Amino acid sequence: MTDPDDPDVTPREASDPSDAALQATAELDSLSLLAEDLLDPSGPLTPSGHLRRRQMVSRLAEAAQTTAAVLAVAVLGILVYSVASRGASVLSIGFLTKDPPVLSGVAGGGIAPAIVGTALIMAVATAIAMPMGILAALFLTEFAGRWTARAIRLALDLLNGLPTIVVGLFVFGLLVVGHHQSGFAGSVALAIIMLPLIARATQEVLTLVPAGLREAADALGVCHWRTVLGVVLPTARGGILTATVLAVARAAGETAPLIFVCSIFSNTTSLNLFGQALPNIPVYIFNASEAAERYGFARAWGAAFVLLAFILLASLGGRALGRRATLSR
Amino acid sequence: MRPPDPSEMPATGASNVRPRVRIQTPALAHEAAQAAANARPTDALRGSPRGEQDSALTVGREAIFDVQDLSVSYGSSQAISGVTLQIHRNLITAIIGPSGCGKTTFIRSLNRMNDSVPGFTIDGKILYHGHDIYDRGVDRVEVRRRIGMVFQRPNPFPKSIYDNVAWAPRNLKMKSGLDERVERALRGAALWDEVKDRLKDSALGLSGGQQQRLCIARAIAIQPDVLLLDEPASALDPIATAAIEELMQTLKNRYTIVIVTHNMQQAARVADRTAFFNLDASDGRRTGVLVEYGDTDVMFTRPADTRTSDYVTGRFG
Ligand SMILES: Nc1ncnc2c1ncn2[C@@H]1O[C@H](COP(=O)(O)OP(=O)(O)OP(=O)(O)O)[C@@H](O)[C@H]1O
Ligand SMILES: [Mg+2]
């Protein structure tokens, strides 16, 4: 048979198989004449000529890459170790459940208000960013035209690259100037940081949903929105959850925006999201380490350890979720 | 539970559907509007189109589809051109032809599955019960509601067997008697006995042949008017294929079936009518054309065109 895509083979030529076969053989011959060194297929199978040099280069490159990878892991290890070794000493049930002491320079006390505040701020930020991120991703993959989608993707990537301190400044101008600091303002700032992360990751997951599933659902005479809700989203559920958890892990430690919008707080547990700034772990760490006194420092390390543990666990959990979701598909 | 009345095609959701369609001439558009206005099923009986042999099978039988001079392009490359044929009620019509001749393109055009393909344009007309399905104001969701499709590769939803079949009826507000509906569909697809004890299990645990029959059950659960099958058995073994072929013979009493197949024996076995598409390379570009269309026994024993006889006997160019 002749190659159906070959424009040179006109139907007349193709109809004579012997002609076409002859031509194909001739092409093969001219190819092998061009090649300088003809391969001797019966020679020994050890590296020879260029191959030896290429192998050396490749070994060098491999060594460099391995070193870099080991270094990256080492940095994480050293960091976790130094935080854990300093923070673990203050860690106790009381540290997680008590208020900080009212006077500075006193040992004991805990960071309960900051833990509660961070949890509340993060919950609200997730409640804002998750639906918006998912809807944006759905619009991108299911409804937007090619150019609109490209523009929105670009916007999300730019938003993702925005310095968080700029986000903080923006929310400060939007919600704090003329009013006062509040936990809600912190949530909004963190939601802005989470939104592009969730939207882009969700979009990646949605593009992995097989096109055949969408077609099958569309072919049943059901509106596309129903297809999205009933088939596309459930199929991508695991991946979307992973994306959200990873975004939470990323935003939970953000400090810069909170310093603007949610940093002047009393050290008592509060659930008042709108009335006042809520204590939160990142700003607490910042404040306590600024205080330049021994016990505050210890509490700062303890809080850092709690935050780090939460973020590491959330990241690992998110990844495990994602792996399970892809396996079940 | 509303049995679809295929002779009425309400223009629902007219505003948000903008198919990339070129209406050929104002005169044709006007004609379509008129046809839509006074068409009843009996009006759709027309004379045979060009190139089609008269046949005892089609005499007095309603033409469900009346395809007139259909050309389809993806971007600047034309996939099929000048296809004119009629598809008749309660018959199995097979589409055969070499790879790339536009068989898939053709049947996907019949229920507007191609609308979302970038660059897709269509010329000519596809009348379904006398209504131009690419007419302005025709909602493609409504089109697909009546013209179901089963794809080459089984594509069950990652849901339970029951939910696969029940999903579309639920979304189409056919919720009363859902259990019976699911059972009827699964029986209709000759799958009930194999799955009745594991309806809550994931459909992905079924074998390929069972999955394909599940897809057929899913398609007939909403009681469409027409079933389009694009090489439904190409991923299946001979036993599963035989099951699906047998199934088609019972389904044709209720539905009008169009099947694309690469398998000549399969076309000869199951189809009442066969259309042979071929690649036409005469003007330097390769486009699919309809070469011959007629009763299957005629097409396979004494075709009028030498290209048809070459193809069905396995003597290619
Ligand atoms: N989505 C698409 N975009 C662009 N070109 C397409 C698309 N689908 C099909 N084509 C082109 O249209 C022509 C007909 O394709 P089609 O899939 O209809 O052929 P077919 O007869 O179904 O082939 P096969 O038997 O291999 O399935 C081919 O040249 C193909 O490359
Ligand atoms: Mg095909």
Image: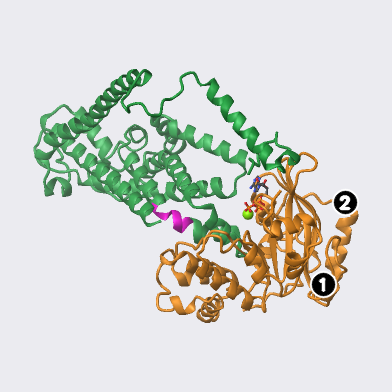
Chain colours: A green, B orange
Horizontal and vertical percent position of residue A1: 63, 44
Tell me if A180 is positioned left or right of B58 in this view: left
Q: Is residue B175 above or below residue B312?
A: below
Residue A167: x and y, percent?
A: 42, 33
Which span of residues is magenta-colored? A233-238
Q: Residues within 10 Å of mark 1 (few under 14, many from 20)?
A: few
Q: Position of residue A109 (x, y in %)?
A: 13, 43
Where does ligand 2 appear, by image quarter?
bottom right
Indicate whether residue A92 is drawn in magenta.
Answer: no
Q: Is residue B31 left or right of residue A40?
A: right
Comes first in the chain, label 2 or label 1: 2
Q: Amino acid at mark 2?
A: Thr
Q: Based on the displayed image, in which of its 4 quarters is residue B63 positioned?
A: bottom right
Q: Which residue is mark 1?
A: B55
The subunit carrying tag 2 is: B
Q: Are marks 2 and 1 on the same chain?
A: yes
Residue B145 versus residue A81: which sits nearer the camera? B145
Residue lying farthest to the right in this orientation: B27
Residue type at numbered disc 1: Ser
Q: Is residue B13 visible?
A: no
Q: Nearer the viewer, residue A190 or B113?
A: B113
Q: For numbered disc 2, what is the local secondary structure?
A: loop
Q: Which part of the image, by quadrant, shows the N terminus of chain B?
A: bottom right
Q: Is residue B234 above or below residue A294?
A: below
Name the residue that disc number 2 marks: B25
Residue at disc 1, secondary structure: loop
Label 2 CB-ligand 1 distance < 8 A: no
**Is the stretch drawn in magenta largely helix, strand or loop?**
helix
